[in-house]
Amino acid sequence: MTMHRTVIALAAALLLAACATEDEIVLLADDDGSVGQIAVNPGSEEVVIADAFQRARVAKSGQATVDRTDAAAVERDYGAAIGAMPRAPKQFTLRYEFGSDVLDADSLALIPRIAAAIEEHAPADVVIVGHTDTAGEDGYNDALSLRRAEAVREQLVAAGLEAGRIEIWGRGEREPLEPGEDRRSELNRRAEVIVR
């Protein structure tokens, strides 16, 4: 998520600046280059920073000013803190045909990317959550959603990952992506893989 690294960097900046005469908040781009925004309201007047390396400084008096810094200064001042933070979680969504626990071709092609993300986050926590649409009885859907999660785990184990590193859950039809009276949409027939 775009704001994940930004918020962590913000928290690190605030912790490091706590002993200084002013607080400093620096907005960083996410790994994909996207940038969110942060509103800083020290009590007198709100300022918003919305560009990478834009910085808000809040004096002990409560007065906020905005300027810019650069990558070299951020690395120098906050590199150790940023380097010590955990990586942002990655999430993948895999799809199935109606009533099946067999991955479709596009989803099967994602398995190497998921395995690479797990290795990149090592030692990673991996959770696979299977889901169904609303067709079928609750018991059937619960069992099918668990089989879907197990099928993804089997693919990841075949790709060289340890089964013990992967937690699986079946949620049946309880958490639809497409809500409404008739939630038989293919969007609801999925497994979500969270790597953190």
Image: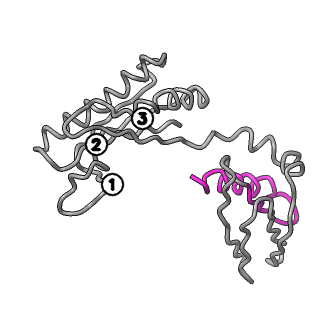
Query: Hey, which quadrant is residue 66 in on the image?
Result: bottom right
Q: Could you say where residue 129 lies in the image, as x and y percent from the top left?
A: 35, 38
> Mark 2 and mark 1: span between their CA atoms?
10 Å
The one nearer the camera, 34 or 20, is 34
Write down the residue under mark 3: 127
Query: Hey, which quadrant is residue 85 in on the image?
Result: top right
> Mark 3 and mark 2: span between their CA atoms?
13 Å
| Left or right of 156, for residue 80 | right
Indicate whether 103 appears above or below 34.
above
Q: Could you say where residue 115 lies in the image, as x and y percent from the top left?
A: 51, 26
Extreme bottom residue here? 44
SS class, disc 1: loop
Specify which label sits upstream in the sequence, 3 or 1: 3
- Residue 11 within the magenta-colored segment of the rendering: yes
For the point 38% across and 38% down, the residue is 94
The one nearer the camera, 161 or 103, is 103
| Left or right of 159, for residue 31 | right
Disc 2 to disc 1: CB gap under 8 Å = yes
Q: Magenta residues?
A: 1-28
Question: Quick one: label 1, few (<14), some, or many (20+) residues within 10 Å?
Answer: some
Q: Amino acid at mark 2?
A: His
Write down the residue under mark 1: 177
> Mark 3 and mark 1: span between their CA atoms?
18 Å
| Left or right of 52, for residue 119 | left
Extreme left residue here? 137
For the point 56% across and 52% down, the residue is 1
* Residue 131 marker: 2
